[in-house]
C-alpha cells in the first residue's frame, strides 16, 4: 500500500483521469501528495529511497495502532487505551521471555493475549457496563500504563533477539516494520470489507438500534471489535519494542491521539459508520511525512508542534469541504463537479501555501552553506535543564560556524529513534544524542555508526552501541552528594521523603541509586516515603501535598531534580527552608534563585550549558577525525546559599 | 401585483442537484387568510419547494415575489425578515430548555444584558394562549408530548409575527382528536389573515381545511384546483393515473395460528395482552397514541423486556427480550421510527437490504457479498424501489422507497410473521398502495401480518380483524365486517376494566 502511494506520486506527471478522480474522492490523499511535493521542493534530502523508507518505518507503529482504532471508530466508539495496551503487551512479552525464560513463541502469544484481554475488558465495560467508550478506554489507558510499570518495575526490559528482528531490515533495504504495517493494513481492509464483524461495524456505527432490530448481536460484536483493536495494539507494541530492542514501560505514551488523528484524517467520521483502512494509512503517512520533513528542514522543535496541529486541521478541513461540495444524492457527471473541484484545489493551495510558508519562514539558517552540519536530539524541551543544554550547544555551534539542528523527542524513545534515523539519512557530519532511554537508543546509534557518522552522547549514555564520547555529569555521584548534604544538615538523624524522577528513565534510576548509596552512611536518617513525581513541578507539588497528609512530621526532602524540589517547596509552604530543608538536583536557573532566596537548601548543580557546549566541541573534533576522550565528565557541585553567588550554569 | 391580498408568488422555479432535477417549472401563490394545500407524492419536490421559501436552498432560475417585490431568500434570517415561518416534520426545539426559552430562542428579551425571564414567560404565556394550548411556559420541552411540541412550534412562529406559515405534514403524528384541535388553531390563524401553506397526504383533510390545492408531480406544478375537488380527481392529478382501489385487500383463507401471545404484561406499560395471528391473516392494531401498541409489538419481537406472559410462534415459546430468538422463529419488525430504528441511513440500499440476512450469508466469518448483492438486486426489483442504484445511500431515498427497503430486508429473510408499526406514515398514496400489495402477496404466500396504524381508514381497509388497544390493554376485538370508524373509536377511548384498574389509576398520579 505504501508503495502504491509512492507510485502515484511519481506517476503524477502522467495525470491520467483515474488518478484525478482518486484525488478528488480522497482529500487526505491529495493533502499527502501536496505535502510530499512541497517537502521535496524544500529539502533535497526528502525524496530519496532511504528517506521514504524511513517514513514508512516511522509511520508503522501509528498506522498499526490506527488500523485497530479504525474498527472502533467505524463502530461509533473510541479507543484511548491503544498506546498503553501496546506498551503493556510489549512489556509482557519481554518480561516473560527475557526474565522468566518463557519460550519466545509462547511469549508472543501471551503479548497478543494481553492485547485481547485489555480489549475484552474495554468491550465488556462498554457493551454490558454501559460505560461511554471514552470513559471505559480512558480507564484502560491508565490501568494499562500502570500495569506495564508494575510488570517491568519501571525499568526497560531488553527485548528477546529473535523478536527484535521485526525491527530489522530485510535484504538491506526493506524494513520489516513497513512489511508488518502493510500486512496489518491488508488485514484491516479485509476485516472491514469482507467479514461479518467488519460489516457489522458499519451497521452498528451507522445506526446501532437498527442493527439490533435487524438481529445483529450488538453487545457481542462490540466485545469483538474492542478485542480486535487490542490485537492491533499488541502488534504495534511489539513492533515498537523491536525497533528499540527494548520494551519500555513508558513507550507509546500519547500515541492514541496520533492514531485517532490518523483515522480521522483518513476520512472516518467520529460519529461512526464510515472509514477505510486505506484512508487510515494515508492519515498515518501524513503525520510521519510531516514529522520527518520538519526534522529535515530543521524547523524549531517548538514550531513543529504548531505546524503539525495546523496541518491536521487543514487535512480534515480539506476532506470536509470536499464532501460538502459532493454531498449530493447521486454521483454522476454534471455541473456540480466544478464547484467540488474548485473547492478541493482551493484548499489544496491553502495547505501548500501554509506548509511552504511556515517551513521556509521557520527555516533556521541556509542549507546551502558548506558549514559542518550536526544534529542534536534532546530527550525533551519541557524542562529548563535541557533547554539550557540546547542554548549552550547553539551558542557554541554559532561560534564554531556549525549548522546545528535541534529536535525534541518529547520523552518518547521511539520518536527519538525516528529523529536519529532522519539525521543519519541526511548524512550529517556528527550527531549528538541525549537519549530518552539508554537501551532504546542503541539501535539508532548502531545505524549511525554503520553510516560512519560520529555520535556524541550527552547527559545520559547509550548502552550496547559505540558512541565516540559521553559528555555527562555523574548522576550517581551527584545523588550521593545530595544524600550527604541533607544528612549533614539534619545532623545525621531525621525522617525524610524522596521524590523520584520519571519511572523508567536512566536519570531517575541512577539518582535514586546515588541517594540510596549516600544514605547508607547515615543509619539515623529514615526514608519514610519515596514516590515518583516524573521530574515535573506540578506533580512534585501534588505528590508532596499527599505525602504531607501521611507524614506531617517530615524533616527533609530530596528531589531528583530542581523542578520537583520547587513543587515540594510550594507544598511545604513556610516550612520550606526553615524547618524542612529541601535538596534538589540540576542547578537550573529557577533552582538557583530558590537557593538564593533560601527556600531551597541546596541543589546538586550540573552545568547544562557546559554539557551542551562541550558536546558540540567534541562532536566537531570527532567529525574532523581528531581524537576525543571516551568520557568527558562535567563536574557537579553542591550549591548552597554560601556559594550560589559565584555559580552560573 | 393585481391582488393586494397576495403574500407570496413563485414563478417558474427550477432547482437541480447533480444528476437530479428536483424542481422544473413550479408556479405557486399564496394569499392572505387562506390555507393553500401542497399535494404531491413523496419525492415530487414539495420539500425542496418549501426549503426555497425558508432559505435552505436557492433556486437555479425563476422568481420568488414576496408582497409583490422580487426577493432572494438566502438563509433563515432572510425568511424570518420576510415573515415566513416553517414548521418541519422534525421539530427544531431544544429538549432541555423551557417552552418560553424555545419560543424566544436567540431572541430572548433582555434587560441590562441579562435575560428578562419574567417578561419572556409572560409573552410566551400570551402566545400559548393564542394557540389554545394549556402548558406552562416554564415546562421543559422534553416533558411534552408530540402534539404540544407542535403547538410550541406554532407559538414560536407567531412570536416571529409570521405572515406566511408553512406546515410540513403537521397531522402525520397526531391523533384525530389532536388533529381537530390543530385545525381549529389553523382556522383561527387564517381568520387573523395569516397565509398558510399546508402539506398533507391525508386527502380528507384537504376538504376539511383547505381553500386551494396545488398539485406537484415530478418537480412540476401540474394543476391548481379548489379544495372541494373530489378525492379521485386529486389522486389522479398527484400520481398521473387513477388509483382504482385505495385498499386492495384480498383475503386468502385463514390458516393455523402462527403467533400467539398470552397474558403479556409489563408493569405500568401494558397489561394482560393476549391475541393470535393466523397464517394468511392481517390483524390491525388500532388505538390512540400512547395506548401501548408499539410497546407490545416491541416486546413480542424481543426488542424490549416484559414481566409476565408468553409469546409463542408455531407453538414454541420464545425467550423474552431476545431479538435473535424472535427472528429465528420467523418474526420480523418494521419499526415505527423508520429512520431512527429501521435503517442505517448513511449506508447503501444494498447494505440495508442485506442487514438481516448477513449472518446467514456468512461462512467462516466471511460475508458472501456477491450473494448478498444478487439477493438485494432481486428484492429491490421485486419491490420496485426507485433509486439510482443499489449503492445509493438510503438517506437520499424518498420515504416510501425507504419503507420498501425496510420491508425488503425482512422479505429476504423469509419472515413468517411480519409486524408493521405505522407502515405508511409519511408515505404518499401511490407508494401506500404498493405497500398494501406487498401485504397481500405476503399473506397469500401463507405469512401473517400484524399491523399497527393510526390511520383508521387504513386499518379498516386492510385488516381481517382489528384489535383495539386503550390504556395498555386490549379493549376489544372486531371482525372486519363489524369494524367501522365509530366502533373502533368507541373502544379506543373506553376504559378497559379489569381487577387491577383501580391500582393503575392511583399509579397514574
Image (tube, helix red, strand yellow):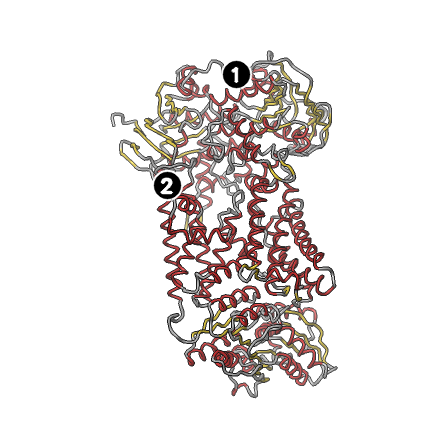
Residue B247: numbered disc: 1
Specify the quadrant of the image occupied by residue B373: top right
Residue B391 locus on image (x, y percent)? 49, 35
Residue A438, quarter of the rendered image: bottom right
Q: Chain of mark 1?
A: B
Q: CA distance from mark 1 to mark 2?
A: 45 Å
Q: Which is more foreground, mark 1 or mark 2?
A: 2
Label of residue A337 in the image: 2
Residue A484 lies in what quarter of the image? bottom right
Q: How many marks?
A: 2
Q: Is residue A166 above or below residue A444?
A: above
Residue A207 in sight in this render:
yes
| As drawn, A499 above or below B493 | below
- Relative height, residue A58 to residue A503 (above, below): above
Q: Residue drawn 65% across and 14% down?
A: B254
Going by the image, does A619 lie left or right of A542?
Answer: left
Secondary structure under the numbered disc 1 in the rendered image:
loop
Q: Is residue B385 left or right of residue A334?
A: right
In this view, the residue farthest toward the front is A171
| Chain hosting mark 2 | A
Residue A619: x %, y % from top left: 50, 78
Amino acid at each position: 500500500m505504501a508503495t502504491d502511494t509512492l507510485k502515484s506520486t511519481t506517476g503524477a506527471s502522467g495525470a491520467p483521469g483515474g488518478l484525478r478522480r482518486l484525488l478528488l474522492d480522497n482529500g487526505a490523499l491529495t493533502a499527502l501528495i501536496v505535502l510530499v511535493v512541497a517537502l521535496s521542493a524544500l529539502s533535497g534530502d526528502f525524496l530519496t529511497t532511504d528517506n521514504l523508507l524511513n517514513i514508512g518505518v516511522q509511520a508503522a507503529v501509528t498506522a498499526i495502532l490506527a488500523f485497530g482504532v479504525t474498527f472502533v471508530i467505524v463502530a461509533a466508539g473510541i479507543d484511548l487505551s491503544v498506546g498503553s495496551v501496546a506498551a503493556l503487551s510489549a512489556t509482557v512479552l519481554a518480561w516473560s521471555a527475557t526474565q522468566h525464560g518463557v519460550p519466545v513463541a509462547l511469549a508472543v502469544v501471551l503479548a497478543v493475549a494481553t492485547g485481547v484481554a485489555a480489549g475484552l475488558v474495554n468491550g465488556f465495560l462498554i457493551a454490558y457496563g454501559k460505560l461511554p467508550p471514552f470513559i471505559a478506554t480512558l480507564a484502560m489507558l491508565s490501568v494499562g500504563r500502570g500495569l506495564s510499570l508494575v510488570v517491568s518495575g519501571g525499568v526497560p526490559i531488553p527485548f528477546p533477539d529473535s523478536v527484535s528482528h521485526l525491527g530489522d531490515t530485510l535484504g538491506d533495504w526493506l524494513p520489516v516494520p513497513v512489511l508488518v504495517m502493510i500486512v496489518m493494513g491488508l488485514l484491516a481492509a479485509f476485516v472491514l470489507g469482507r467479514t461479518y464483524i467488519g460489516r457489522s461495524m458499519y451497521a452498528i456505527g451507522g445506526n446501532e438500534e437498527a442493527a439490533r432490530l435487524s438481529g445483529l448481536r450488538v453487545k457481542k460484536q462490540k466485545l469483538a471489535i474492542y478485542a480486535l483493536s487490542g490485537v492491533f495494539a499488541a502488534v504495534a507494541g511489539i513492533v515498537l519494542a523491536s525497533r528499540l530492542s527494548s520494551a519500555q514501560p513508558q513507550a507509546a505514551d500519547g500515541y492514541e491521539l496520533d492514531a485517532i488523528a490518523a483515522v480521522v484524517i483518513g476520512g472516518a467520521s467520529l460519529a461512526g459508520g464510515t472509514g477505510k483502512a486505506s484512508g487510515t494509512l494515508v492519515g498515518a503517512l501524513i503525520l510521519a511525512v510531516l514529522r520527518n520533513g520538519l526534522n529535515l528542514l530543521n524547523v524549531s522543535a517548538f514550531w513543529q508542534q504548531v505546524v503539525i496541529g495546523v496541518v491536521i486541521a487543514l487535512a480534515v478541513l480539506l476532506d470536509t469541504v470536499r464532501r460538502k461540495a459532493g454531498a449530493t444524492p447521486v454521483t454522476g457527471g454534471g455541473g456540480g463537479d466544478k464547484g467540488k473541484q474548485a473547492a478541493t484545489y482551493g484548499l489544496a493551495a491553502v495547505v501548500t501555501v501554509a506548509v511552504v510558508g511556515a517551513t521556509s519562514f521557520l527555516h533556521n539558517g541556509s542549507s546551502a552553506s558548506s558549514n559542518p552540519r550536526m544534529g542534536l536530539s534532546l530527550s525533551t524541551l519541557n524542562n529548563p535543564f535541557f533547554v539550557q543544554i540546547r542554548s549552550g550547544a547553539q551558542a557554541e555551534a554559532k561560534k564554531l560556524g556549525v549548522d546545528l539542528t535541534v529536535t525534541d523527542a518529547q520523552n518518547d524513545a521511539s520518536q527519538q529513534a525516528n529523529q536519529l534515523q532522519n539525521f543519519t539519512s541526511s548524512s550529517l557530519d556528527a550527531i549528538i544524542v541525549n537519549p530518552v532511554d539508554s537501551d532504546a537508543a542503541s539501535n539508532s546509534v548502531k545505524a549511525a555508526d554503520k553510516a560512519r557518522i560520529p555520535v556524541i552522547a550527552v547527559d545520559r549514555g547509550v548502552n550496547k552501541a559505540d558512541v565516540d564520547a559521553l559528555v555527562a555529569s555523574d548522576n550517581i555521584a551527584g545523588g550521593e552528594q545530595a544524600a550527604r548534604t541533607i544528612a549533614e544538615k539534619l545532623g545525621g538523624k531525621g525522617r525524610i521523603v524522596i521524590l523520584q524522577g520519571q519511572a523508567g528513565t536512566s536519570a531517575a534510576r541512577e539518582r535514586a541509586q546515588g541517594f540510596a548509596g549516600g544514605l547508607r552512611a547515615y543509619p539515623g536518617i529514615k526514608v519514610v516515603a519515596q514516590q515518583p513525581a516524573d521530574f515535573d513541578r506540578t506533580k512534585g507539588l501534588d505528590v508532596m501535598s499527599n505525602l504531607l497528609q501521611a507524614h506531617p512530621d517530615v524533616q527533609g526532602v530530596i528531589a531528583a531534580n530542581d523542578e520537583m524540589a520547587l513543587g515540594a517547596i510550594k507544598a511545604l509552604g513556610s516550612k520550606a527552608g526553615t524547618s524542612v530543608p529541601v535538596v534538589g538536583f540540576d542547578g537550573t536557573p529557577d533552582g538557583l534563585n530558590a537557593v538564593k532566596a533560601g527556600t531551597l537548601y541546596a541543589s546538586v548543580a550540573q552545568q547544562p550549558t557546559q554539557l551542551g557546549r562541550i558536546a558540540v566541541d567534541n562532536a566537531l573534533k570527532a567529525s574532523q577525525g581528531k581524537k576525543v576522550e571516551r568520557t568527558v565528565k562535567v563536574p557537579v557541585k553542591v550549591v548552597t546559599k554560601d556559594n550560589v553567588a559565584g555559580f552560573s550554569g | 401585483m393585481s391582488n393586494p391580498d397576495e403574500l407570496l408568488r413563485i414563478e417558474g422555479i427550477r432547482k437541480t442537484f447533480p444528476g437530479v432535477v428536483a424542481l422544473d417549472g413550479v408556479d405557486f401563490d399564496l394569499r392572505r387568510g387562506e390555507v393553500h394545500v401542497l399535494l404531491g407524492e413523496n419525492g415530487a419536490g414539495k420539500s425542496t419547494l418549501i426549503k426555497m421559501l425558508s432559505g435552505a436552498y436557492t433556486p437555479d432560475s425563476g422568481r420568488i415575489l414576496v408582497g409583490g417585490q422580487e426577493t432572494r431568500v438566502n438563509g433563515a434570517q432572510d425568511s424570518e425578515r420576510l415573515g415566513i415561518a416553517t414548521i418541519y416534520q422534525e421539530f427544531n426545539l431544544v429538549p432541555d430548555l423551557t417552552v418560553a426559552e424555545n419560543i424566544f430562542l436567540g431572541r430572548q428579551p433582555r434587560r441590562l444584558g441579562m435575560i428578562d425571564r419574567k417578561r419572556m414567560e409572560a409573552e410566551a404565556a400570551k402566545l400559548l394562549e393564542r394557540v389554545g394550548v394549556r402548558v406552562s411556559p416554564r415546562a421543559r420541552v422534553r416533558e411534552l408530548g408530540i402534539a404540544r411540541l407542535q403547538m410550541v412550534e406554532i407559538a414560536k412562529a407567531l412570536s416571529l409575527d409570521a405572515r406566511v406559515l408553512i406546515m410540513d405534514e403537521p397531522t402525520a403524528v397526531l391523533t384525530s382528536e389532536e388533529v381537530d384541535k390543530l385545525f381549529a388553531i389553523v382556522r383561527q390563524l387564517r381568520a387573523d389573515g395569516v397565509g398558510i401553506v399546508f402539506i398533507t397526504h391525508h386527502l380528507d383533510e384537504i376538504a376539511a381545511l383547505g381553500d386551494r390545492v396545488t398539485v406537484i408531480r415530478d418537480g412540476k406544478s401540474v394543476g391548481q384546483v379548489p379544495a372541494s375537488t373530489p378525492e379521485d380527481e386529486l389522486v389522479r392529478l398527484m400520481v398521473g393515473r387513477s388509483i382504482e382501489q385505495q385498499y386492495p385487500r384480498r383475503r386468502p383463507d385463514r390458516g393455523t395460528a402462527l403467533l400467539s401471545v398470552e397474558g403479556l404484561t409489563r408493569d405500568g406499560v401494558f397489561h394482560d395482552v393476549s391475541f393470535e395471528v393466523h397464517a394468511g391473516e392481517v390483524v390491525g392494531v388500532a388505538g390512540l397514541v400512547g395506548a401501548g401498541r408499539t410497546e407490545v409489538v416491541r416486546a413480542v419481537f424481543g426488542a424490549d423486556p416484559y414481566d409476565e406472559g408468553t409469546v409463542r410462534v408455531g407453538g414454541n415459546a420464545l425467550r423474552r427480550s431476545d431479538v435473535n430468538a424472535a427472528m429465528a422463529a420467523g418474526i420480523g419488525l418494521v419499526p415505527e421510527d423508520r429512520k431512527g430504528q429501521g435503517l442505517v441511513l448513511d449506508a447503501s440500499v444494498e447494505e440495508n437490504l442485506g442487514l438481516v440476512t448477513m449472518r446467514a450469508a456468512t461462512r467462516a466469518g466471511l460475508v458472501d457479498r456477491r450473494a448478498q448483492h444478487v439477493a438485494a438486486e432481486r428484492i429491490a426489483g421485486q419491490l420496485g424501489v426507485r433509486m439510482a442504484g443499489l449503492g445509493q445511500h438510503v438517506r437520499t431515498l424518498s420515504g416510501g422507497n425507504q419503507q420498501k427497503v425496510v420491508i425488503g430486508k425482512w422479505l429476504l429473510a423469509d419472515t413468517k410473521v411480519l409486524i408493521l408499526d405505522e407502515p405508511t406514515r409519511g408515505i404518499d398514496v401511490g407508494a401506500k398502495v404498493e405497500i398494501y400489495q406487498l401485504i397481500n402477496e405476503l399473506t397469500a404466500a401463507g405469512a401473517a401480518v400484524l399491523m399497527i396504524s393510526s390511520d383508521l381508514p387504513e386499518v379498516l381497509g386492510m385488516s381481517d380483524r382489528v384489535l383495539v388497544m386503550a390504556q395498555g390493554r386490549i379493549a376489544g376485538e372486531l371482525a372486519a365486517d363489524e369494524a367501522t370508524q365509530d366502533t373502533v373509536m368507541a373502544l379506543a377511548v373506553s376504559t378497559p376494566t379489569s381487577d387491577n384498574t383501580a391500582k393503575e389509576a392511583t399509579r397514574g398520579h
